[in-house]
Amino acid sequence: MGGNTFGSMLRITTFGESHGKAVGVIIDGVPAGLPLGEDDIRFELQFRKPGGKFVSPRREPDEPEILSGVFSGRTTGSPVAILVRNMDVQSSPYEDYRYRPRPGHADLSYVLKYGLSNWDYRGGGRASARETVARVAAAAVAKKLMLLHSTMVAGYLASLGPIDAARPGWSEALCAKYSPLKAPDPTTEEKYVEVMRQALEAGDSWGGVAEVIVMDPPAGLGEPVFDKLKADLAKALMSIPATMGFEVGQGFAAARVRGSEHRDNIVMKGNKPGLETNRAGGMLGGVSIGEPIIIRVAFKPTSSIRRPAKSVDLRTGEPVEISVKGRHDPAVAIRGVTVAEAMVSLVVADHMFRAGLINPVRLSEEEAATIEDRWRQYRSACHG
Amino acid sequence: MGGNTFGSMLRITTFGESHGKAVGVIIDGVPAGLPLGEDDIRFELQFRKPGGKFVSPRREPDEPEILSGVFSGRTTGSPVAILVRNMDVQSSPYEDYRYRPRPGHADLSYVLKYGLSNWDYRGGGRASARETVARVAAAAVAKKLMLLHSTMVAGYLASLGPIDAARPGWSEALCAKYSPLKAPDPTTEEKYVEVMRQALEAGDSWGGVAEVIVMDPPAGLGEPVFDKLKADLAKALMSIPATMGFEVGQGFAAARVRGSEHRDNIVMKGNKPGLETNRAGGMLGGVSIGEPIIIRVAFKPTSSIRRPAKSVDLRTGEPVEISVKGRHDPAVAIRGVTVAEAMVSLVVADHMFRAGLINPVRLSEEEAATIEDRWRQYRSACHG
Amino acid sequence: MGGNTFGSMLRITTFGESHGKAVGVIIDGVPAGLPLGEDDIRFELQFRKPGGKFVSPRREPDEPEILSGVFSGRTTGSPVAILVRNMDVQSSPYEDYRYRPRPGHADLSYVLKYGLSNWDYRGGGRASARETVARVAAAAVAKKLMLLHSTMVAGYLASLGPIDAARPGWSEALCAKYSPLKAPDPTTEEKYVEVMRQALEAGDSWGGVAEVIVMDPPAGLGEPVFDKLKADLAKALMSIPATMGFEVGQGFAAARVRGSEHRDNIVMKGNKPGLETNRAGGMLGGVSIGEPIIIRVAFKPTSSIRRPAKSVDLRTGEPVEISVKGRHDPAVAIRGVTVAEAMVSLVVADHMFRAGLINPVRLSEEEAATIEDRWRQYRSACHG
Amino acid sequence: MGGNTFGSMLRITTFGESHGKAVGVIIDGVPAGLPLGEDDIRFELQFRKPGGKFVSPRREPDEPEILSGVFSGRTTGSPVAILVRNMDVQSSPYEDYRYRPRPGHADLSYVLKYGLSNWDYRGGGRASARETVARVAAAAVAKKLMLLHSTMVAGYLASLGPIDAARPGWSEALCAKYSPLKAPDPTTEEKYVEVMRQALEAGDSWGGVAEVIVMDPPAGLGEPVFDKLKADLAKALMSIPATMGFEVGQGFAAARVRGSEHRDNIVMKGNKPGLETNRAGGMLGGVSIGEPIIIRVAFKPTSSIRRPAKSVDLRTGEPVEISVKGRHDPAVAIRGVTVAEAMVSLVVADHMFRAGLINPVRLSEEEAATIEDRWRQYRSACHG
C-alpha cells in the first residue's frame, strides 16, 4: 500500500528513482492566484544540487518543468506537477551490488520486501536521496505560501561528526544555505571542511545534525491529538533517507533535567503572552504558540565509503567484502539540511491551511502581491 | 481540521477529555474472527493505571466497555468501540488556572488556538494524558494481531533524570511493565525510587527516556517513501503528550561517528541475511529487516510541580506566580513507557496489514487459535 | 480495511450494530465555539425514530448522550462523541436466519465476506439501518454549521411505489419531515397512506425515491476532479442501506434529450450570474454555482416481508422458504428520506470547510450567535 | 483542498489541463512484479482516443511515457508515473469565452470558485474531459491486476438519446469497445450512427447512458458502512465530467416496484449460493456476492453545440449569445463509456486490495505469469 503521498491539505505525491527517467511531484491543494514559475523551483533546487566537492559528483542540471496548474504565471487551483529529468545516470557500477546488498543501505530491505527479481538495484532505486529533489521542488510552493504570514524557515548544519557549530543568529541561519557545507558562519565552515577532508582521505564519512528554525510562525498550528505539529514534523523528517533521530527544543536533554529546569515561564511580550525561554521549541501540547519552532534531525554517516565492509551474496549466502564505488555524498547530512528545511516548510504550510490561516481555494490579489514582494526579499537576502 | 484519527488500515479514532464524561476509541479495520473481550483490554490498561505512589493519585478504575464489533467473544469485522468512563474527576482546583495558563502545559496553546471562552480548562481537557487511556486500550487489539507473527513489543524506562538503566535482556524488557517505575531490573528500580523520592520532596519532577523494542518483527514493514516505518513510528510517538525527541537504533549518537563505525555488516544468520550488529535499529531505508526494532522517546519532566513558576493573567496581562496543585505524575515518563509501547504496537500492526501480512477481512480458525494461545502465554509471562 | 469513516475536514466515524449495546459516532473537525446540546441531536433524531405505523415498530427512545467535545454548552474543538444506547432489542427471531440468509438482505454478503462463524446475524448486525442513527445525530452538527451561510437542507419522499408527489415549494419541502410518510403535502400524504396500507395488507412493501434540496448553497463547493460535489454526494447517498440509484438535477432524463434541451441559459439574477432553468441541479463541473442543489436517491422496497421467498441453508445447501418476521419498515424509503437529508448535510458542511467558508478551528462569537439564532428559527419552522 | 487523488490502496493522483503541456497520473500501490509496458497503456487509450467522426476531431497521438516504477518490464513497488503530452492544442477560439461562460460547462463554476483572473479558460482547463486520459491510462494497471481473479470489466453505450441498445451478451459487451459508438451490436450501431448524424446536422447533441458490467468478481468486495462497493462506484462514476446519474442493478426502477417483485431469490449455483435473478446488480449491503456487478451512468448531452444559447459578459453583466465553436464530442457519452469502464476497474481493483485478495507488496512469479497470460487473451479477444 503506497506511501508516496504526504500532507493533508497541501499534499504532495512524488515519483521517480535514482536511475530512472525522471523524478517529480504533484502538489495538490495549492490555491489559485499564487505567482509561480520554474525559476522559483530552480531557486530552491540549487541548494541541494549535486556536483560539488563535498556532495555527490553526479552532474545533474536539476531543471524543473512545470507541467500543469499554472497559467499566465499564476496557479489556477489545479494540481501543480513538476518534472525533473535525470540526466547523468551511470548504472553500470551497480551491477556489482545486484546480488550483494551494500551495508547500511536499503538494498537488503528492498530485496526482502519486493523480491530480488523486482528490485531496481541501480543507484538505490526509489530509496536513493535522488527522490528528495521532488520534496525540495515542492517546498518552493510551501515557502511562498508561508510568506503570507511572514513565516520563514531556515536550516543549517548544527554538527558534523565531532564538530559543533556555534548557535547562529537568525540571519546567519537563513544564509547558511549558501555555504557549501551549510555552515552558519565562516569559522564553523572551515572546521567542517577540515573534518570532511580528513574523512575523504580516509575513505570514510561522518554523520551530522541538521537544525531547522521556523521564524515567526503563527500560533495555533497543530491538531490534537495525533496530528500535533511536533508529530507531523517528526514524521516528515524521519521520512528523509539516513535519518536516525528527531528532537524539538531542548530535546533529549529535557529527559535529564528537573521540571523546574525545563518548563518555560510565561511572560508578556509586547501585548501577547510568550515564553521567557524557549526550551519547548515553540510548541506546547504539540501546538505552536508564536515562538520560533526549533527542531533537529540526526543523520547517520554515509554508508557508501571506500572502506570495506562485510556483506553476503544473496544467491549463495557466501560472505563477500564490499568497498563502495559510485558517486556519493561524503556526509549526507549536508544536503540533508536542505531536505529537512523543505520538509519542515511543507508541514508548516499544510498546517496553516488546516488552521484556516490560508484560504484553500484562492488568494486575493493583495495576498498574492504580498507574497511576491516578500519572496523577492527572501531570494535576495544574504547578498548584501 | 480534526486530528483524532491515527493509522492507515488499522485505524483508531479517539475522543474524551480529562474531566469529561468518558474517554474512548473506535478501532476500525479489525478483521473478523479475533477473540476479544473486555478482559484483554483491562490487562493492558492496568499498566498505565493511575493511583500509585509515583503516578497520579487520581483513582480511576479504568473499566473498559466494548460497545460494538464483538459478538460471541469474536470480532465481527465491524468497528470495535471501547468506552472508559471517567469516575474520579475533581475539577475545582482548575478554576485557578482558567485565566492563568500553567507553564509547560498546553493551556496557553489551546487558549491561543481555540479561544479563551471555548477552552476546557479542567485538568488539561483534551491535552491531558488521560486521553492516552484510549490508545492503550486499542493497543490490546494490535498486540493480539501481531502475535500472528510471534511479534511482541516491550517498553521500559531507559533513564529517569540522571539515572540510566542497564541494558536489559529481552525477558527483562518484557517484564518491566510490572515494575511501578517500569524499571527493567530491581537495582535500577531502587535507584529510580530514590531519585523520585528526592524530587517529590523538593516539589520537583524528572524527565526520562522510554525505550521500546519490537521482538521478531517480520521483514518488509514500512512503505517508501513517506510512510517509512521509522517515520510512522516517529509520528506515533511524538503524538504522545510531553515527548521531546525520538530516535531509532544508534540514534543521535550516529551523527557523531564515522560511516565505518556506524553501518552494520551483513551476515548470514541461519539461512537468512541479517545484521552483525544492529545500530540501524532494525530498519534500513525505513523498512524492517527482521532484526529487533529499537526506538527511544524522550519525555520532558512533569510541568505541574509545587515549585512556583511565572505566568500571566490572560485578562489583564499581569504577571502571576503559579504553584501547581491538582493530581499529577511526578515523572510522566513512567506511564509514558506504557503509552509508547501502545503506539509502537499500533504502528507495527498497521504496517503488517499494509504489507499484506494479516488478512484485513478475517482470520482463519487456525490463526485465531494461534493468537489466543500466544496471548495466553504473553499474559502469564513474568510470573514464573 | 475499515470503511467506517466519512468526510474530509468534517469527519464522522460510526460504530454499532442493530442488536449490540449501542450505536454512536465521533465527529472530528467541529470548530470550537459552536453551541451544541443533546437537545439539538434529539431534534434531528425524532424524524427517523422508529415506532409508528409505517415504520419499524421497534421502540427506541433514541436518547443521545454527548460524551465529549462540549463544555459549558459550546464545542471546544475536540472530537464530539455521541452515544445512543439500544434499548429494545429482540434477537430471538433472528436465530431462524443464522444459517438461512434472508433474500434481499446483506446476510449472504456478510457471511461470504466475514465468515459464517463470525457473522452477527442479529437484526442485520452492522448492515442494519439502525446504524443510520449515528449519521442523523452527526448531521445535527452539520446543519448548524451550514446555517452560518444560511444554507438549509430539506428532504421529502418524491415517490412511493407508483405514486409521485407533486413538486413542492421550498417551505413544503422543508416541512415534509413532520409528515409520517415524509410527504410534502396532505394530498400526497393520503395517497401514500393508501398505497402503504394495501402493501401491508398484502404482506408486501414498496420502493420509493427521496429528493433532497439544498437551499442557498454558496458557490464554489466541490473539489475537481475526483471530489466533485456531485461525486461526494453520490458516495454519501449510495452508502445508505437499500439505495439503488442517485441522480442530480435532470438526472437520467438528461440522457434522453438534446444539448439544446438540457443546458441551462446563463442570465443575471440581481447582480450575480445564475441559471435561467436549473436542469443542472445546482452544479456545473461538479462545483456549486449558488443555485439550489437538487438530488434524488432511489430506495428499493423493503426485503423483509411476509410473502415467502427462496433461500438456502448454508450448512447443507438445501433450499428453504423464508417469510420474514421481525420488525421492519414497510417502505425503507420513508425513513431513508431523513438519512439522505443527513448525508447531504454532512457532505455540504464538509465542503464548506474545504472551500474555506467556515473556519476549521473556531467560530467567532458573532458567528456562533448567528448560527444559534437561525437554528432557533429552523426548529420552530412549520409550526405556524 | 485538492481533490485530485482517488482510491484507497490502489491510489491515483492526476494532473493536467486541456490546453496545458501534458496530462498524467501517478499510480501508487502497485505491487512489485506486475509485467507492465507502455504498450499496455496504449492498448487502453486507443478506446478513448479523439479524432473520429463522432468524437472530438482534436488529433492527439496520446502517446504514454512511463516515467517511473517499472524496471526490466516489471513494476518495482514504486509509484508508476505516466505522462501523456498534449500535442494538438488550439487555444485561440477560447479567447471568446474568457469573459463569457459557455452554458452547460464548468466555466461559470470555475470562475466563481477560483476567480476570473486565475481561471484557465482554454478548452475547459482542468474541467475538460481531456483529464480523463489519465484515468484510462491508470485503468490499464487495474485491469491487469483484476485478471489475477479472472475478473473483467466491459462497458457499452446502453442508450443514445432516444435509442436503446438491445441487452448484449457478455462477449458482445466486451467487444463493444471496438465500435466507434461503443454499440454492442451492428444493428444498434446503425441506429446510433443515424441519430448522431441527424444531431450533427442540426448543430445539436444527445445524452446517453453507459452500462458497465464486472464479470466474475470475487465475493466480499466493499467495506461497510461508508465504503460500500456501490458507494465507491457511485463516487468514481459521478466524478466523470457530464454525468447526471448513477444506478446499480434494477436501479431507479426498483423504487417503483414491490418487495416481492424486487428481491432476488437465493439459490445454489453449483456448490455456491447465488441469486436466481440479479436485480441487485451483484451486491447486497453494498458488498459483492460473486454475481456480475452491473451499473449504469447517465451522461448529459454535449453542451458545446452550434445552436446558440444565452450567457452573460462577466465584466459588464450584459447578455450575450453563444454558439460554441472549438472541437467537441457530439455525444460525450460515447467516450464516456471508456472512462466509466476505467473508473469501475480502478474501484474494483482497489477493493480487491482492501479485501486482501491481491498482495499489496508483490506478486509471485506464478501470479505474474497468470496475469500476463490472461491479459494476452483479453487483448486478442473480439478478433476472431
Image (spheres, coloured by chain):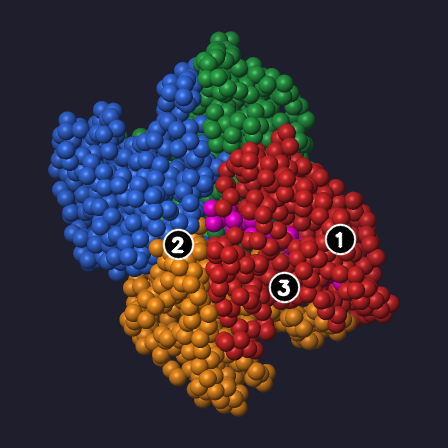
Chain colours: A green, B blue, C orange, D red
Q: Position of residue B361 (x, y in %)?
A: 42, 50
**Badge 3 element:** strand
Report how far apart the C-alphas of labels 3 and 1 lie in the structure. 19 Å
| Residue D340 shows in this picture | yes
Mark 3, Cα crowd under 10 Å, few <14 / some 14-19 / many 20+, is many
Seen at 65% across and 43% down, the residue is D375
Chain containing the residue with disc 2: C
| Residue D333 covered by magenta stretch | yes
**Badge 2 element:** loop
Residue pointed to by mark 1: D178
Left or right, D190 with respect to C216, comes to right
Chain containing the residue with disc 1: D
Chain containing the residue with disc 3: D
Answer whether labels 3 and 1 touch (C-beta < 8 Å).
no
Amino acid carrying mark 3 in the image? Arg
Q: Position of residue B340 (x, y in %)?
A: 31, 39
Closest to the camera, between mark 3 and mark 1, is: 1
Instruction: Tell me the tag on residue D296.
Output: 3
Range of magenta residues: D327-356
Seen at 85% across and 69% down, the residue is D198
Q: Nearer the viewer, residue B383 or A252?
A: B383
